[in-house]
Image (tube, rainbow, N blue to C red):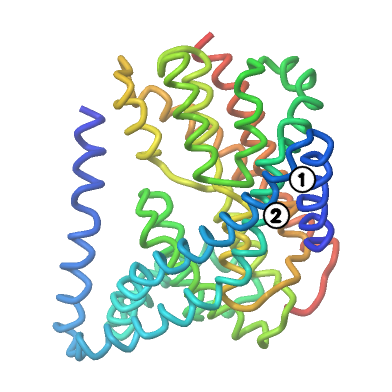
Amino acid sequence: MFLSILDAVSRWAIPLLLFLVPLWGILKRVPVYEAFVEGAEEGFSVGVKIIPFLVGMLVAISVFRASGALDVVSRACEPLLVRLGAPAEVLPLAFMRPLSGSGVLGMATELMKTFGPDSFIGRLASTMQGSTDTTFYVLTVYFGSVGVSRYRYSIITGLLADISGLIASICICNALFR
Amino acid sequence: MLNYIWLTLLLSGIVVAALNGNIEVVTQAALQSANDAVQICINLIGVMCLWLGIMRIGEKAGLIETISRVVRPVMVRLFPSVPPDHPALGAIIMNLSANILGLGSAATPFGLRAMQEMQKLNGGRKEASEAMCTFLALNTSCITLIPATIIAVRVNFNSANPTEIVGATIFATCCSMTLAVLVDYLFRRANRRTI
């Protein structure tokens, strides 16, 4: 039931938007095609503008991850999180969460393949993956698109939100699924 | 701040690789991810053109304005430095709704549009404005009502109940979002500046 509603939403949302907005536009006497092209023109310059920011950030994150430095950090924090009730296997995923969206999805998939989606680890990994967004990626792309390079306190806000999402995931999964 | 984080990630990675005796990994990771980054941006361009085009129609038809008017009471409180009828608020709302509904492809273009509008208010400076920080606090902590990607993965591995984690995810998201709004508010109060 829930799954079919979900399926319907994801199948219909975009076609509906593409149907309703231009229709509304023509009813309001907007020259729809001209307006579309005018808006779309910006897409290119924004996409190109992000490139240097994203290259810089992804290179640093990727070196940090591939070298094994991420594992070192996650091993150092292990006792703390295990005390909260998280199995040691999911810890690398917790540290990957703010750094890389595709990385975290890969890890969650791997964990579910190994332990099964209905194991405690599988459920916790699913919850953690869905609970916050990839802070570094979002900040890099969004600030990069307008040429802002001084992020002030927003990194700390983002990371604190990630930590609270992580702790909340561990607590709620322990309460619901243990 | 960012300078130090960036440097730490990069240098500690290289040091750890050197200590582990596999320094080649650094070269490979650096070159590969530089390539990936450009690929991601290129892939973003098409989607961006599509949604920014649709959004411009919506703007000209007064649709965005209507939406902003409905949510104004909340937005004015969250974004006190943005004038109440500024187009930035409409774009912010479109971005957050697309995020919540799980329309990832539409969320980014709307969000970048919101950033552009806020950057106009910011006078094109290189430093983030308060409104931008609040927006990104909301954006990074609120992901989606329905985590469609992970549900698809669970279905793929024959989970008996693929959607059972939705409640837990919403709970965790609410916690991180509440904290983000709170922390952002405290920071904003701590270093009061104009805009």
* Marked residue chain, label 1: B
Quarter residue A168 falls in? top right
Residue where numbered disc 1 is placed = B13
Residue at coordinates 52% horizontally, 48% vertically from top-left?
B142
Q: Position of residue B138 (x, y in %)?
A: 58, 55
Q: Which amino acid type is marked by label 1?
A: Gly
Q: Is residue B21 left or right of residue A115?
A: right
Residue at coordinates 53% horizontally, 80% vertically from top-left?
B117
Disc 2 to disc 1: CB gap under 8 Å: yes
Towards the viewer: A30 or A115: A115
Q: Are marks 2 and 1 on the same chain?
A: no
Q: Is residue B134 above or below residue B57?
A: above
Residue at coordinates 64% horizontally, 62% vertically from top-left?
B134
Please rate how many residues cluster around mark 2, counting C-alpha atoms within 10 Å: few if below 14, some from 14 to 19, many from 20: many
Towards the viewer: B56 or A51: A51
In what quadrant of the picture does the N terminus of chain B appear?
Answer: bottom right
Q: Position of residue B185 (x, y in %)?
A: 73, 57
- In the rendered structure, find residue A60 and report the number of the disc placed on it: 2
- Residue furthest to the top in view is A178
- The secondary structure type at the circle numbered 1 is helix
Please rate how many residues cluster around mark 1, counting C-alpha atoms within 10 Å: few if below 14, some from 14 to 19, many from 20: many
Q: Is residue B25 above or below residue A34?
A: above
Spatial separation of the CA atoms under disc 2 and disc 1? 8 Å
Q: Position of residue B160 (x, y in %)?
A: 30, 14
- The secondary structure type at the circle numbered 2 is helix
Q: Which amino acid type is marked by label 2?
A: Ala
* Marked residue chain, label 2: A
